[in-house]
Image (tube, rainbow, N blue to C red):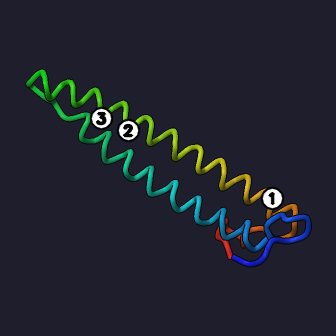
Amino acid sequence: MAAPGIFGLPNTGDAADLGGRLLRQARELEDIRHRAAVVAALDWESPAGRNFRQYLAGRAAAVGAAAELLEQAARLAEEYAAERGDAPLAGGTWR
C-alpha cells in the first residue's frame, strides 16, 4: 500500500484495492457458506448426525453474515473511492 493521503486517510487507489479485496473475500466466504449449507441439507439418520447438521447450519448462517458484512465494507470502500475520484471501471470491476 502507498503512503496515507492527506490527513492520514488512505489514498483513493488504496481504497479501490481494499474494496476489490474485500469483495473477493466475501465471494469466497459465500462459496464456503454454500458448501456448508449443502452438507447441512443432507438427511442424517443418527442423533449425532442431526446435531451436527444443526451445528453446521448455524455455522453456515454465521459465515453468510460475515460475507454480507464484507460486501458492505467493500461498498463503503467503493463509495469512499468514488467520492475521492477513483471509482471502479464500468461494469463494476476495480482497477
Q: CA distance from mark 3 to mark 1?
A: 36 Å
Of mark 1 and mark 2, the one earlier in the sequence is 2
Residue 31 image position (x, y, % from top left) = 39, 53
Residues 52 and 90: in front is 52
Residue contact at pointers 2 and 3, CB within 8 angstroms: yes
Decide which of tag 3 and tag 1 comes sooner along the chain: 3
The amino acid marked with disc number 1 is Tyr
| Residue identifier under label 3 | 56
**Residue drawn where x is 91% and y is 69% of the image:** 6
Q: Which mark is residue 80?
A: 1
As drawn, 87 above or below 58: below
* Left or right of 82 on screen, residue 56: left
In the displayed structure, does residue 89 sit left or right of residue 50? right
Residue 93 is left or right of residue 38, and the answer is right
| Alpha-carbon span between mark 1 and mark 2 | 30 Å
Q: Residue at x 59, y 44 (%)?
A: 69
